[in-house]
Amino acid sequence: MSVLVTNIGELVTNDPALGEGPLGILTDAALVAEEGRVAWVGPSTRAPAADYGLDVAGAAVIPGFVDSHTHLVFAGDRVDEFEARMRGVPYTGGGIVTTVAATRTADDATLRANLARLVIEARRQGTTTIEIKSGYGLTVADEERSLRLAREATPETTFLGAHVVPPEYAGRTEEYVALVTGPMLAAAAPHARWVDVFCERGAFDVDAARTVLRAGLAAGLTPRVHANQLGPGPGVALAVEVGAASADHCTHLSGQDIDALAGSDTVATLLPGAEFSTRSPYPDARRLLDAGVTVALASDANPGSSYTTSMPFCIALAVREMRMTPGEALWAATAGGAAALRRDDVGRLTPGARADLAVLDAPSYRHLAYRPGVPLIRTVLIGGEPL
Ligand code: NIG
Ligand code: FE
């Protein structure tokens, strides 16, 4: 089956060889999707025939968002914690155990339904590739279950057994790390592509984090790291040391951290929804970009620090609060996310890539930041099929 999308006022391909600037923009363009892939892009006037037509009447079309960092397997919410925070109680990550308790007692059907609801919510806002972490189970059975359910929604699943030390292991971090790197990893690995660790004061120190990431590597998983979120620390350096696909958060960075990222293949994934919802200072995106670091934007969707699945909201924050240009923010939310997941078949609309795209209710992608909070995602195609 083939689909011809015509009358595209502004088509963002993310391929500079296909159009103007780093976003490879074509105007008055068309795109053909065939068997789930992009088969052709070019001027509307030269568009080939296809089985079906979709006339978007001058709207902008962008690659679907690649949300490379979410925590969507959980039960319950933490709205009370959010309200207290807005009154001045600081975020420490201490509320994670509240979600762990709720998640452990939930049955599979409850977890699956909540996950499905949130994935649909994300897709309606233009997300076409999503990474989902475990990390609210923290027992062998609950981590295995979290990843098994996440796998039903996406191939991009991440084992985060080292999220925090659960209460029953309080004061016995070494024993917990042995559990994570032993039986828990063995149960998780068949359902996971990635391994992650929360390397932060109050969670796991650099030695424990390294142990977890190395064990994950040995089990065939590629590392990603929750790094330098709440304060300066060794997380980013560790991410680069182990060849992690991304260092996520990157809120408190030293000059050395930035140099290390710039000289590596590790993507800096910025999660401004977390700074927004924890009322924290935003990461210095300009410093990272000016140093040549590859930057991704992701939602960090989770019930504690960032309960949003909206990539357009994250783009608006990145532009308004982190001084990224609208173009840099869109690239980071699409091609940047793809780089963070080491994927070259998503995040761009070039022949051969997956036909994952969003049609905007706007003439330009720049409206995503210019019109914050407005539902601008009109139509979403995933693998060439309408949502
Ligand atoms: O990425 N930092 C650790 N984990 C999550 C928050 C989890 C929570 O508060 O439930 C994050 O912000
Ligand atoms: Fe996170």
Image (cartoon, rainbow, N blue to C red):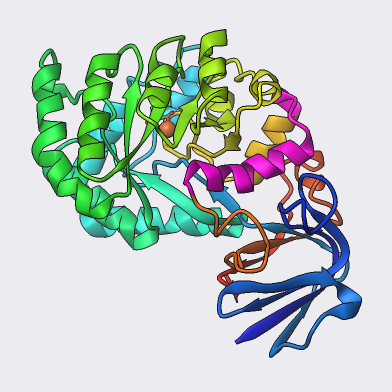
User: Of residues 78 and 132, which is closer to you in this image?
Assistant: 132
As drawn, is 364 to the left or to the right of 247? right
Could you say which quadrant of the image residue 51 lies in?
bottom right
Residue 295: give x, y in percent of width and height: 60, 33
Q: Could you tell me if residue 276 is visible in this image? A: yes
Give the overall secondary structure of the magenta segment: helix
Residue 31: give x, y in percent of width and height: 75, 72
User: Of residues 114 and 296, which is closer to you in this image?
Assistant: 296
User: Of residues 73 and 382, which is closer to you in this image?
Assistant: 382
Residue 115: give x, y in percent of width and height: 38, 54
The quarter of the image holding the C terminus is: bottom right
Does the segment drawn in magenta span residue 325?
Answer: yes
- Classify the position of ligand 2 by quadrant: top left, top right, bottom left or bottom right: top left
Residue 105: give x, y in percent of width and height: 18, 44
As drawn, is 374 to the left or to the right of 90? right
- The vertical placement of 108 against 38, above or below, is above
Does the segment drawn in magenta span residue 312?
Answer: no
Q: Residue at x 29, y 43 (%)?
A: 221
Q: Residue at x 60, y 68 (%)?
A: 352
Could you say which quadrant of the image residue 370 lies in?
top right
Q: Residue at x 38, y 57 (%)?
A: 155
Range drawn in magenta: 320-342
The quarter of the image holding the N terminus is: bottom right
Q: Could you tell me if residue 168 is visible in this image? A: no
- The vertical placement of 231 against 183, above or below, is above
